[in-house]
Amino acid sequence: MKSSRLICTACGKEYSDECFRCECGEPLEVVIEMKRTVKIRSQRPGILESFSDFLPGLEDKNFLSLGEGFTPLTRLDDKDSSGMELYAKNESINPTWSFKDRGSYLAVLDAIRRGYNHIGTVSTGNMAASVAAYGKRAGLKTTILVSDSIPDEKVSPISIYGSRIIKVTGDYGQLYYDSLEAGKNSGIYFANSDVPMRVEGSKTIAFEIFIQLGERVPDFVIVPTSSGGNVRGIEKGFRELRDSKLSVSIPRMIVAQAAGCSPIDLAFSSRASTITRFHNPKTIAHSIENPFPPSGNAVLRMLKRNGGATVAIDESSILKAQKSLANNGLFVQPASAVAYAAISKLREEIDVRKALVVVVLTGSGLKYPAILKEHPSFIESTSLEFLEEILKGNQNFID
Amino acid sequence: MKSSRLICTACGKEYSDECFRCECGEPLEVVIEMKRTVKIRSQRPGILESFSDFLPGLEDKNFLSLGEGFTPLTRLDDKDSSGMELYAKNESINPTWSFKDRGSYLAVLDAIRRGYNHIGTVSTGNMAASVAAYGKRAGLKTTILVSDSIPDEKVSPISIYGSRIIKVTGDYGQLYYDSLEAGKNSGIYFANSDVPMRVEGSKTIAFEIFIQLGERVPDFVIVPTSSGGNVRGIEKGFRELRDSKLSVSIPRMIVAQAAGCSPIDLAFSSRASTITRFHNPKTIAHSIENPFPPSGNAVLRMLKRNGGATVAIDESSILKAQKSLANNGLFVQPASAVAYAAISKLREEIDVRKALVVVVLTGSGLKYPAILKEHPSFIESTSLEFLEEILKGNQNFID
């Protein structure tokens, strides 16, 4: 282990590395003993440069990138000691703090290549903020269509990016289809939830997982699923890796939904080949609360081919999973917690012992601060005078 | 440019790439024509592996990493066309969405190496969440000391990580010093704002900028400054690059403060060698609202040696800069907007034409959602029936 010294930034006094400030009151700093040759390595890669062989032809406008993708793959403990090797793909570390940025970037480049000067989407959450950010940055006219029931606190983190926002009354599910049609007639590229470029964007999640695991393919990949575009993309990515002979297998895909809105799980469980609209959806996992997902049938076809499965998670398990992930340093939105909660459910149905499992955490917990009220905080109080005493007490470590 | 085809995921019908869904109603997807040899490149690097030659000896516990660092360096337009080459170092894309994660990770490793089983910090914002996340993940007892005036909405995103939180009445500035002392006596490693490992963490920002610019050194680096630990670390990083002969110069460091709390700017402007406590601080840039920064004097010494400068920004310019960055796709907390606003101020005092400038954006805009109320949203309304009409109208594109 390298030795290091501490030196005062003011008086220059040297210290062994056991304290933080000098006796003179000023801060200490580390002195690095330079070796004769030093090197620094590595540049942050971009998804376009890294995966160009696997992506369609796109406009080469790298300056429009915000640094999407190449999110961390974080090791998680297997608390049940079943020998499972478990990782979280943390998509909250993206420019607008969700996985949507991958597809939004590709969609903007695709729109420009095709001569569009106007981009849009239908969303009240992650995708709205993402398209607003990328569209504006690219200098495109940008229109976000939202449901007329959207609360103010969800509009403001979208409108900050400066796009046009239109509340639309009427069936929100129908708005997906009507916007594509209206876009075709009015020259607007609607980068909705499961359009081809979004699926291409999600593919890059699979490529990164494969690289980050040292060119291994997981046994299971668990994906919080709403429209179905993301899980389709991740499966497609692994399939293309195998088809190009870079890998020899494909993970089984696990579609995780909230029990309060689980149209794909219901259809899959009843062996139906098409989904049915889910009535009266209600879940804290708002960002996957789509009662009639436009890629629902495509996901059912994918699962059949893939040997995958679906899981539906109740509300209290979602909250518990959110807290448990936070205790591992990962504060995610409830939709992402659904994927983590799916592991316990999966154990009941499938032998996952010694399996290599990746859960996809789709967005940041900061996206939905209202949920924090569901997690009680216990806060102690003291005064400066009694600080040391209370610290020595060492009580109240919460789990 | 590569050709790509679209194919229906259900019926298999092929399309030229000009639509999003098949006539049969199901989604289309891209078919990639595989070349004979394909390759995928690049792994997301970590700061420890990449910069080990420049960091002190630390415990080799990479599994405790959450993927901190290697944040994007994003190109920004030079709106004034002075030929400035301008970049933003976007530290909001970190595991707890601020630059603090670099130092928290190193501090946790340092604490473990030294045999501590308990870590803490004094903070009500970014650093509190960061230490809570990393401390908990490492299985250390974790204690966060906060001011007794902290509002609930700031406590909950800290307490979600599960650490012990103690409100302390009395002088909050004194708490910095008292906690270090109490920590020494009770075996707690207090990773406060400017301790040596935080400065080491911030150094890695300099290394990354250097690499991301293709081994060039900026002329100016602008850093929102509160305690002073971050700007000290970034300068130290560039200094070590030069001392190790990897570069030949050091950027001039620009310390950006809110005019509503600018103790370093006041001292620097009056050529004082020590700072004076700033009375009645008041700014929307809460995370840099430290009236008596513990590295204030060290920053003054650094600026003198470095040839740097200070800038103080008024509240309305902070808001304007926040909006302007959002229009470039970067939604940052007000403290980060201070650094961007500093550019205009700098132009008045220093010739920055044709300069290579980097602004450090320290944290995510989602950290402080209350600020969104200061940016009015204009929202239109329509019904499904009139959707196409209003879209063709193309009105109301906000800037």
Image (cartoon, coloured by chain):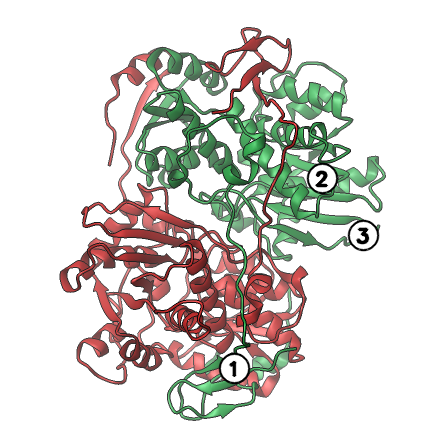
Chain colours: A red, B green
What amino acid type should be assigned to the residue bearing mark 2?
Ala
Report the Cα–Cα distance between label 3 and label 1: 38 Å
Same chain for labels 2 and 3? Say yes or no: yes
Residue A56 can be seen, yes or no: yes
What amino acid type should be assigned to the residue bearing mark 1?
Leu
Q: Nearer the viewer, residue B239 or A265?
A: B239
Helix, strand or loop status at disc 2? helix
Q: Indicate the position of residue A52 as horizontal and vertical percent values.
A: 58, 68
- Tell me which numbered mark, 2 or 3, is placed earlier along the sequence: 3
In the rendered image, the residue lying farthest to the left is A348
Q: Nearer the viewer, residue B231 or B214?
A: B214
Q: Indicate the position of residue A280 as horizontal and vertical percent values.
A: 25, 72
Q: Residues within 10 Å of mark 3 (few under 14, many from 20)?
A: few
Residue located beneath label 3 in the image = B80
What amino acid type should be assigned to the residue bearing mark 3?
Asp
Comparing marks 3 and 1, which lies closer to the viewer? 3
User: Could you tell whether B32 is left or right of A162 in the image?
Assistant: left
Report the Cα–Cα distance between label 2 and label 1: 42 Å
Query: In the rendered view, would you say B135 is above or below A270?
Result: above
Q: Residues within 10 Å of mark 2 (few under 14, many from 20)?
A: many
The chain identifier of the residue carrying mark 2 reads B
Q: Residue at x 60, y 82 (%)?
A: B3
User: Could you tell whether A1 is left or right of B391 in the image?
Assistant: left
Q: Badges 2 and 3: C-beta atoms under 8 Å apart?
A: no
- Tell me which numbered mark, 2 or 1, is placed earlier along the sequence: 2
Q: Quadrant of residue B148?
A: top left
Residue located beneath label 2 in the image = B342
Residue located beneath label 1 in the image = B387
The chain identifier of the residue carrying mark 1 reads B
Same chain for labels 2 and 1? Say yes or no: yes
